[in-house]
Image (tube, rainbow, N blue to C red):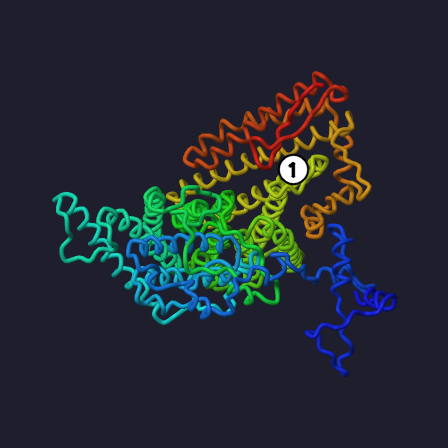
Amino acid sequence: MEASSSSSAAASPLPPLPPSIPISSNQGVWADASPLLAAACRDLQDGELVHGENFSLFAAMSALEIMDPKMDSGIERSGYNSIEEAIEDGVAPIPLSLDRTLDVQCSIDVMDHLFSCEATWHKGHTLAQTLFTCIYLMRMERTSSHAILNSFCRILRSTCNAIISVVSTARTHEEEDLFIMSFGLPLRDEADDKCLSILNSVEETISRQLRACKAQAMSKKKTLEDLESLQDNPDLEEDYCRALLCRLRFRKHFYHVVMCMRKPNGRGLELGRKHVASCLNELNLMVKSREFLKSQSNITIQDDENCTTASGCRPVGFDVSLNSRLLSPAPPRAVRLLSWISAIGYFEKLLNDLDVICALSLDPVLENVLHFIVQFQKSVPDLVPRAFLQQTLLVQDGKLYGQNLFSDVISRALSLPDIIGDKEFQMNEFVVQLGQLVINLLKILCTNTAWQRRKLGKSLQDWSTISIQLELALKREFGETRNVLHHENMCMRVSKQLLIWTQEHGYWIASRFLTLGFELDLYSPGEYCMVYWYMYVVFTKLIEKMQLRVLASSETSRRKGKKKKDHSKDSARDTTFSSSCLLLQCYVLLSEGLSMMLAVLRNESRSFQLPSIFNTEQERFMQHFDLLQKARVPEHISYYSFKESSSQAGITDLVKYNFFKEIQKIIPSLRGSFASEPEKLAELRRIEQVAEHNRIALNIVSQVGPGDPSLRVSFEFTHHPHFAVAVVKRS
């Protein structure tokens, strides 16, 4: 702009300077750039930019676009320079209206709008642009004369402060790092410790008024004695009491849910479930109150997608721009609040997720814990329930549920003999490291899907490193020893079990890493062949390690000399193990069958090959599996292994080894084993449907011939999120 301005000045004399532009000898001469800007506005098209010669891409990334609401923090200014100025202008009156009926209506609107703000904050926006757009929250002392509003705001603020504490301690907020930033806002006050008693007092007053209304209706009296009504219209008193009570009670029970779930060692889970049920009941009553509140508003046209109150009215006491300056140095994001209906839906899901967490049996078996987290993540929980799951339950003070040392969890998984002392095992260097890896694994599994996959891939290198260290230590200590004492021999077996257990969990992490790629849509159809091939290899290794671990545990148990009464427990464990292995075998068969089917189609019909000018198939292989390759999971596996395997696939071998038909033989035997586990029964049904559809598709392909040019095969995830179904058509 300076260069353009200089050239314009050389061509024609500058117009006289307006009096508003000062001339100072030590600051240079000011020039009016208005004509230049006007000319630029006339000539520039959308997307074009006036800039100097030294303007770079880096500078463009740091630039602010004037008059853009997302970039220019001043464009949506209300005109108030401070909260005090807004209060003086009557933005947040106390009482909300001199008309007592309208005051109650406005109070409910404020509660509903705060409800929408709270849900929007939970979804990742900032406190300054959601809840603390409310001037009543910013200046709580002003509401002391308005008991209903004061009690509601205080318990809301206390609840938010407790949730921030949980999320920040869990450290899952790295994915939504704006969640816990308070920007210096007043999040706590000494009087907040009494928020529950204040709310109970207000609730009791309104409850008495509601009971009086019911008694009046039954006795048909025209006046209420000894009680001051909430508002001036007796015909509306009962409905307003109901609308207020359900909102106040929801806040009370939700506060109790948060407090109960924060109790150590899971002591508050049972009571927390009761409060969750009460919250859901109050939400239902809030929805029922909507018809009445809408009937009392003067608004006839309702936009449910943008309306943040049940009545449809705009609430008083809010200003979206007062705290925008607190967000520096980053520009404020454009925030669209969730509608009141959407907020109801959000809290219903949140409460159901919290109920699932509260219903968790505090089982110290690590395999069951991992299965629970994976199942819980299928419902795509938001940040708050995931933080509660991790911080208040799974990992407390470095212990599982705050009760079990992770060394004991590992010892239980290995079925270690009594000859190995607890202290000796707990202080073992490898056990300490593995305990920390398990803690990190649980924390990673509680993050969102994208973060989870990336961190799982990186953590694999830690598991691989400790596996190598264990193997080297085992060879160093016992590799040259032939005649060993019984105790030393037992130590060697324990070391082997620890190595196998570590390798098994490395393969489990790898399988989770690969399947999450489907949930994140990271794979294209042309890459399905290599992905299913890698899954087949990983699942096969996982079964192998599971079998070795169980055999080693059984050997240790026999040497311990189990009592007869323990044989039934061993039998039950063996049955569970065999069922888990058979389920994994179904995954192996599905992966191998799909990989071979895709390889056959690639080889004989040249389909599912996506040549790219940007990268080769080998480069795509490394892009998807680089983290697994670095961790050597599995060992001796490379792109050339995949290429050699897939290039030899033919339709004859695929039909001969009908993997999908083998799955259908295994499924019936598993139904009885999983009869008491609905989740696994549902998984069996999904696997069976995938196998059946792919078996039919394979028959059609073999009859027509994969090289037939009229054959069109596509893959869809209609029955299972990780295993595709072949759809065969003829043109």
Q: Horizontally, is 423 left or right of 35 in the view?
A: left
Q: Going 69% across and 51% down the picture, which residue do you hit?
A: 627
User: Is the N terminus in the top left, top right, bottom left or bottom right quadrant?
Assistant: bottom right
Q: Residue furthest bottom?
A: 26
Relative vertical location of residue 199 with respect to residue 285 in this rendering, above or below:
below
**At label 1, which amino acid type do we have?**
Tyr
Q: Nearer the viewer, residue 508 or 487?
A: 508
Q: Going 26% across and 59% down the picture, which residue do you hit?
A: 202
Q: Horizontally, is 655 left or right of 241 in the view?
A: right
Q: Residue furthest right?
A: 11
Residue 308: where, in percent of width, then height? 44, 50
Q: Going 48% across and 36% down the picture, which residue do you hit?
A: 680
Residue carrying label 1: 536
Q: Nearer the viewer, residue 524 or 121?
A: 121
Q: Is residue 249 visible?
A: yes
Residue 442: where, in percent of width, then height? 52, 54
Q: Going 36% across and 47% down the picture, which residue do you hit?
A: 297
User: Is the C terminus in the top left, top right, bottom left or bottom right quadrant?
Assistant: top right
Q: Secondary structure at mark 1?
A: helix
Q: Horizontally, is 265 left or right of 52 in the view?
A: left
Residue 189: where, in percent of width, then height? 38, 70
Q: Is residue 478 visible?
A: no
Residue 30: name its quadrant. bottom right
Q: Horizontally, is 465 left or right of 401 in the view?
A: right
